[in-house]
Image: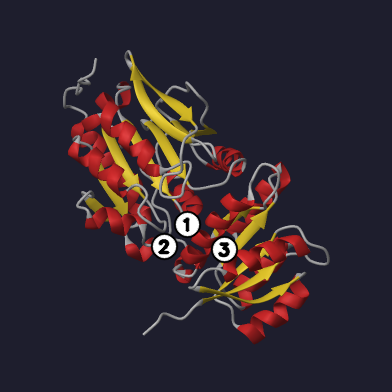
Amino acid sequence: MAQPKIKVLIVDDSATVRKIFSEELSREPDMEVVGVAPDPFIARDKIVYLQPDVITLDIEMPRMDGLTFLKKIMQYHPLPVIIVSSLTPQGSTMALEALESGAVEVLAKPGASFSVGEMSTQLKDKIRAAARVNLRQVRRPVPSSPVPAGAISHALAETTQKVIAIGASTGGTEALKEVLMNVPENIPGILIVQHMPAQFTTAFAERLNRLCPIEVKEAKEGDSVLNGKALIAPGNFHMLMKRVGAKYIVQIKDGPLVHHQRPAVDVLFNSVAQHAGANAVGVILTGMGADGAQGLLKMKEAGAKTIAQDEATCVVFGMPKEAIKMGAVDRVVSIDRIPQEMIRFLNYSSSKPYAKEKND
């Protein structure tokens, strides 16, 4: 029997955006646009009458802004919501607040720097992901369990050869916050790929930097991977790691989409497997699709320890599930246990000799 179509309600004050979204989604056999609304007041009635599976919601609208409306939706009629925002600092900041308030995805509005073709592909992928979310987990994040001070061994704290690579997608902004807020200040350098449009990653890194005990910044070409610092791949660019002499640095590159994504988790994980080998820990968090699974397997085959977020605490159990199916994962744990597992793996391998790179 055929699967029922995903029913989508489009809420946007722009008639052009409503038209583009409706036309693009109507081409998909698994989707149906059941309605459109120019503002939250009209949308409110259509939600009750049409019972959509997913809502796309503009963040900046007259009469009531999207953020206020989102909070009302999550309180009275919880649904998967994709926030649509302009590529501006204010729009990015509001979009991040929306993710913290229960939205499951964020999408950049089509414009001069973001083509309709790119938007169309990402919109469809995000709607499919949103339709599969664990709403209970979106609304009730797992309590955090901070890693106690002194959890990192002295030998590990002194080395610069260890690195942690993390990949995430749908639900990842909150999952990453849970992880990074609960790591010790002297943790080895962390590299992160979170599927996110350009400019949103800048605001995301700035917000995490204010909340976390370590420094968090959007990565730039040539940045060093340092203890107590997390680098987030900039939106619309791949991030790779390489070793130069005695240190690791990151490279920021353009290039084709991988798994429909740029940045892609596989691109990062593959580079970490090549240049860090057994001196790395790989972590794959909530998200739809298979990005990161193959790269995590390469990390494990190179001697790295690997961790996946469990199904119960994932917003979408897609990327971790694929990695587990491939045999790429050493440990499957809840989001609140991931900081402890990272430290346990790092301490376990801290006495092992540095694996010198073959190509040197």
Q: Nearer the viewer, mark 2 or mark 3?
A: 2
Question: Of helix, strand and loop, which one carries label 1?
Answer: loop
State if disc 1 and disc 3 touch (CB < 8 Å): no
Q: CA distance from mark 1 to mark 2?
A: 7 Å
Q: Earlier in the sequence, mark 1 or mark 2?
A: 1
Which sits earlier in the primary sequence, circle 3 or circle 1? Answer: 3
Q: Amino acid at mark 1?
A: Thr
Q: Which residue is mark 1?
A: 170
Residue 46 screen position, x and y as percent: 69, 81
From this view, report whether residue 251 is shown above or below residue 83. above
Query: Is 212 in front, or is 236?
Result: 236
Question: Spatial distance from mark 3 to mark 1, Cα to Cα?
Answer: 12 Å
State the quadrant of the N terminus.
bottom left
Asked whether the beta carbons under mark 2 and mark 3 sit within 8 Å of each other, the answer is no
Q: Position of residue 223 (x, y in %)?
A: 47, 23
Q: Which residue is mark 3?
A: 102
Judging by the rendered image, the residue that carries numbered circle 2 is: 316
